[in-house]
Image: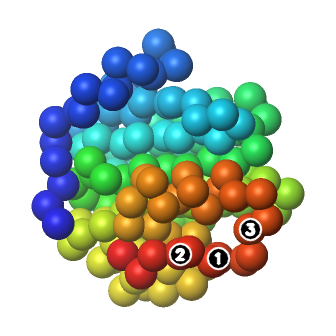
Amino acid sequence: MAPNKRKPSSVTDVTDAADLTGDGLTIATVGHGDISVLTVWGSIDLLTVPQLTKSVEDAVSAQPAGLIIDLTYTDFLSSVGMSALVQAQETIGTDRRFAVVADGPSTARPIKLVGLDRTLALYATMDSALADMTAAERPEHEGRATA
């Protein structure tokens, strides 16, 4: 599935008015109950990873029950970007939930090629990630997509 570079109309519901926009990267933070969702548009590479890291730190400082990084609209994910995803999971800690939404050749494929789909909770859709994270009793990685 090719990434869609257009922002969906639901982005008007963004709770963080200070979205980080830079060369090739836009990050919007939206709350879904006690879950924070960072939706990323553009390329995640050496130049833009600091923006993603800052957004993760800001989201985690609000003490959400979980964090989802949505790469649905991301058109490139470098190795440093994948490292940032691992760092985001470490930042949120083991007492809170973490997931990545990625589907397609520019995001899910590199994650799988390096084996991070065995480390990160990877979902093909935002709906499946939210459903799993908000389930009352959530067995380890049940409902995980094989994006």
| Residue 6 visible at all | yes
Residue 27, labelled with which disc?
A: none
Q: Which residue is mark 2?
A: 144
Q: Residue at x 46, y 67 (%)?
A: 123
Q: Name the residue rendered at 16%, 36% in the picture.
A: 6
Residue 130: x and y in percent read 55, 52
Distance between the Cα atoms at labels 3 and 2?
11 Å
Q: Quadrant of residue 65?
A: top right
Where is residue 14 drawn, in percent x and y? 45, 22
What's the distance in space between the residues labelled 3 and 1, CA to CA?
Answer: 8 Å
Q: Secondary structure at mark 2?
A: loop
Q: Is residue 63 left or right of residue 133?
A: right
Q: Quadrant location of the N terminus? A: bottom left
Amino acid at pointer 2: Arg
Q: Earlier in the sequence, mark 3 or mark 2?
A: 3
Q: Nearer the viewer, residue 51 or 122?
A: 122
**Helix, strand or loop for disc 1:** loop
Which of label 3 and label 1 is nearer to you?
3
Q: Nearer the viewer, residue 121 or 19?
A: 121
Q: Where residue 79 appears, x then y in whole percent?
A: 39, 68
Q: How many marks?
A: 3
Q: Is residue 90 above or below residue 11?
A: below
**Dots 2, 1 in contact, CB < 8 A:** yes
Mark 2 Cα shell of 10 Å, populated few (<14), some (14-19), many (≥20)? some
Residue under pointer 3: 138
Residue type for callout 1: His
Q: Position of residue 74 (x, y in %)?
A: 28, 51
Please, what is the three-letter code of the amino acid marked with disc 3? Arg
Q: Residues within 10 Å of mark 3 (few under 14, many from 20)?
A: few
